[in-house]
Image (cartoon, grey):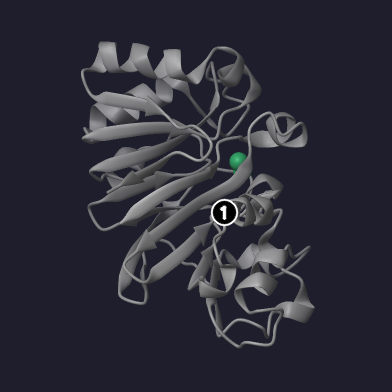
Amino acid sequence: MRLTFMGTAGARFMVARQVAASGGLFIEDGNTRISLDPGPGAVVQYAQRKIDLTTLDAIVVSHRHLDHVGDVNVMIEAMTDGGFSHRGRLFCPSDALDEDPVVLKYLRRFPQEIVRLAPETSYSVNGLTFTTSGRHVHQVETYGFRFGHRLGWITDSAYYEGIAEQHQADVMLIHTILMHCRPDLPHLCIDDAERIIREAKPRLAILTHYGMAVWQANPQEIAADLTHRIGTEVQAARDGMSLEL
Ligand SMILES: [Zn+2]
Ligand SMILES: [Zn+2]
């Protein structure tokens, strides 16, 4: 399985200025290709890497915030060859489809299937299985994911009891928006990331989805410091970084 970071920017200021890209994650496993959280500019990131979006098998959305779904509609069109090819699946929380939807109604008939995500449920795309976490502590309906024991993806959330265990995997991605914890904001800070890594003990933890303060503090240095303190390898994702899992 190959994972590529189509962006590492998190939240509105980083995304609005495109300080880093915000195209989400791309997973390839054999012939299976999945786009996760195609945020603003995702279609550009895929095009720049010459990835043929008509070969995508699924688009998975963790939650309806703009930095995660900005390009979901154009990605659905691309996956379905402009709507002419009835193929591919969209997985998203129900509130991405219901009131104030982020998935446009006119293109909902383009994919083969639209699946409403439920907590702690497994789904399979072309033989690649992934499992949702419990509902994250966030402003909207949000789920994290585990791809077997290979990859755990902790998308936006405040810290909660069980978050480490629910995403436990060999390699874990952690969305670290905040430099310092703020009880008024439902996001993970660097101290939360450290706590999660200590609890889950992955082989490799990767920080991504940086807020502006984390970016300005230099994610690479933060990761090196965490590695030193915890004794688990921690990396900071860079746009375009790719790794085999
Ligand atoms: Zn976000
Ligand atoms: Zn969010």
Disc 1 Cβ-to-ligand 1 distance below 8 Å? no
Residue drawn at x 71%, y 66% is 73
Judged left or right of residue 119, residue 179 is right
Q: Position of residue 83 (x, y in %)?
A: 70, 83
Q: Residues within 10 Å of mark 1 (few under 14, many from 20)?
A: many
Q: Position of residue 27 (x, y in %)?
A: 42, 57
Q: Where is residue 234 in the image (x, y as percent from the top left)?
A: 32, 25
Q: Determine whether 96 is above or below 85 in the image.
A: above
Residue drawn at x 68%, y 52% is 44
Q: Which amino acid does label 1 sit on?
A: Asp
| Badge 1 element | loop
- Which image quarter has ligand 1? top right
Q: Determine whether 162 is above or below 19 in the image.
A: below
Judged left or right of residue 113, residue 120 is left
**Residue closest to the eye, 217 or 123:** 217
Q: What is the quadrant of residue 20 in the picture?
A: top right
Kindly identify which residue carries mark 1. 37
**Residue closest to the eye, 192 or 82:** 82
Residue drawn at x 21%, y 32% is 201
